[in-house]
Amino acid sequence: MAEEMPAHDLVGSVGIVERRYHTFANPDSPFRLENGSELPEVTTCYEMYGELNDAGDNVILIEHGITGSSHAAGRFQPDSKYAGYWDALIGSGRALDTDRYCVIAPNALGGCRGSTGPSSADPRTGKPYGSRFPAITIRDMVRAQRPWLDAIGVRRIRMVIGASMGGMQAIEWAITYPDMVDGLCLVGSNAKQTAQAVAFNHCMRRAIMMDPNWRGGDYYDGDPPRSGLALARMIGHITYLCESRLDREFEMRERHPWPQPERDDYVRYEIEEYLDEEGRKLVHRFDANTYVWVSRAIDLHDVSRGRGSMTEALGRIRARCLLIGISSDFLFPPQQVRELAEAMRAAGVDARYWEMESDSGHDAFLDEQEKLAEPLSGFLGEIESGSDEWDEWDKWDEWETNRAN
Amino acid sequence: MAEEMPAHDLVGSVGIVERRYHTFANPDSPFRLENGSELPEVTTCYEMYGELNDAGDNVILIEHGITGSSHAAGRFQPDSKYAGYWDALIGSGRALDTDRYCVIAPNALGGCRGSTGPSSADPRTGKPYGSRFPAITIRDMVRAQRPWLDAIGVRRIRMVIGASMGGMQAIEWAITYPDMVDGLCLVGSNAKQTAQAVAFNHCMRRAIMMDPNWRGGDYYDGDPPRSGLALARMIGHITYLCESRLDREFEMRERHPWPQPERDDYVRYEIEEYLDEEGRKLVHRFDANTYVWVSRAIDLHDVSRGRGSMTEALGRIRARCLLIGISSDFLFPPQQVRELAEAMRAAGVDARYWEMESDSGHDAFLDEQEKLAEPLSGFLGEIESGSDEWDEWDKWDEWETNRAN
């Protein structure tokens, strides 16, 4: 998952953006986490595009994926080569239209891009938390965003949207604060983590912890575990793509002749070089502890925890829901996203499913984000009008008939 | 991939077996590898079940997967808990019937279970090759088996069979020595490595090389890179399973409460503990250099190399071919195996496809090996009679019609 995307054309762009910060809680009045431990201070780094109206109810809240940040749109400098990760979707006249909506994008709790996370200084000691950072959950990420949104004047959320881990936060939002959320859009994500995804995350954590620089997570006074984090990223990156895309893009093209001995830096195929480069790119902008803590939060994701059953949990949702599956997604197979939509409907929720046709795998939500514009516009139109007017949604009856056969 | 399987009932078992060894080449007359380098000595460790007939033409040759060995059937000791990896398929009255056939199973070149590999002593120095072991290919594995089979009196191979990397060797056999092979059976394998599989193998090699004990591959005078090899195995193991199996077997069952801090040895879910255990199990019986060298041989697998085109390469095959895809195989998707069968037929080869219905992923060729008995018996019957008598093969015309639509 790329954090930033190449800058698109500037017509409609939100332009130059800046990070903002909000802090709440203090050692006397800490933020209590789902597992009972406490954080003495919670800072949320965020970006805002468009104007918050007086009623504070024209908000689109965007949640990011595992290695994302608050930088969803625009550029930090006029000459930035890269724009925010959903830049093509956010701006004047774009699907998430900043003429009408106030689009707000936070960095998640546990992150390393401005919000409180393992690399932040513990105000009680002045030193980075490191291994002392408490275990957090997706639900904690969501609950930590409420005081911040209250403080900046947000009263209602027209739509909360996220892909991948962002979708996990989005659905938690609609369940934790059902009366505040009008619309939920989840892209390539789920309501409960799967065993296969845990298996990959476990290998990624092991890779980080195998790096001699890991030192139990307390590495801030020395070299960080770059090799381990890079390998974790490489493993993860394979799951963000898909076989057909890998074969199409790399086709086993060779980089080096093969009679070379098997040295540590030897790569024969372009795909190997590409993965090494993906790993290298991440370590310059990301903290290994955040990778460990946030991947654990993902593994703990289960909206039904403490809520009776999955049906009861989903039944809490009052928002209109749009679930988007990516046809070639290996990590969050479209069939599972569709089944979640079905489970929502069975729980009495107003849910619709749309499949993004793509041969790019999970990362299509970034790489082919333009494809999301039409369904998002259609969905927002329905939220505003309160009707079902966009007729491109999945033919539900047809699907149910097919499934019954 | 498990090397050994729990012992099945003893009726028909090949009983107590022993490893045998054959060595050829010497420093003055070395074995020349595909990349031009040379091995001064090649030892093949193998097992034999059943009697070789006088004509030397009743042979079934079995090739193993990446972490396998020559131990395909029987037990080493009467009280062994485990039998060879395809024990249910090999024996008196079993699919690979030792009353009729002489079943021969070698450990591949590059291996660490008795055949020459990176952990073997270089006869020129008396020390393990380590980083000085030359790059090998699947074709080298096959070519190294020819002098050994000649020496022990094998004249024809009724069927060469292998799954996974074993299938890669099997198809190379049928192409390199077309006049010696009557039948080829390939299970969950291919004719050319894919970019996605290279990507996973690359991460596995990186995991091994990140271990401080790796020392460039020259670790035999100290501790081997156990953590790295274990992590490589864990990554590989995920690809041998499939999502539905992981979800079915592990169901996100929890092992430890989650308010625990994120320590190096912390596991929350059973799937994490299971993967750790799979990693630990391998390091006791396997050499990290073999994992690196043999995974590279797999990545170099391409039967068309130096043979004009894939069609020309496949067109060399004179053997009757059975290609078996595993319905839930993630690593070698059944569609690809089927396409290989189609490509073979297009090249004029007598190929049939059969799909093993399984919800167990790639490892089904071991875990559900009983399902292979019927097609293997049917296929061997056809090889013997020279006719097409088993009518359970894929309905080819139907399939081609469907594909055309």
Image (spheres, coloured by chain):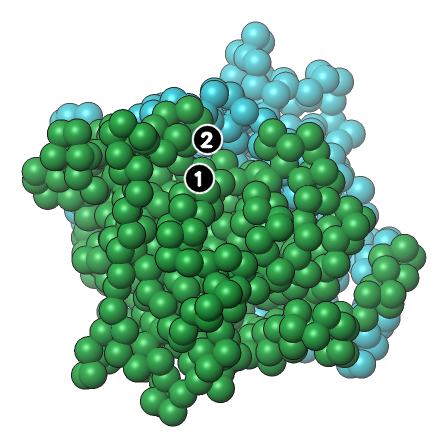
Chain colours: A cyan, B green
Q: Chain of mark 1?
A: B
Q: Residue furthest left?
A: B221
Residue at x-position 19% and y-position 25%: A223
Pointers 1 and 2 within a single chain = yes
Label 1 vs label 2: CA separation? 6 Å
Q: Would you say residue B67 is visible in this rendering?
A: no
Q: Earlier in the sequence, mark 1 or mark 2?
A: 2
Mark 2: secondary structure? loop
Direction from residue A95 to residue A182 in the image, left or right: left
Residue at x-position 26% and y-position 56%: B21
Mark 1: secondary structure? helix
Residue at x-position 38% and y-position 91%: B11
* Quadrant in the picture for residue A376: top right
Q: Are marks 1 and 2 in contact (CB under 8 Å)?
A: yes
Residue placed most toward the observer, A109 or A44:
A109
Give the labeled residue for mark 2: B34
Residue type at mark 1?
Asp
Q: Residue furthest top?
A: A79
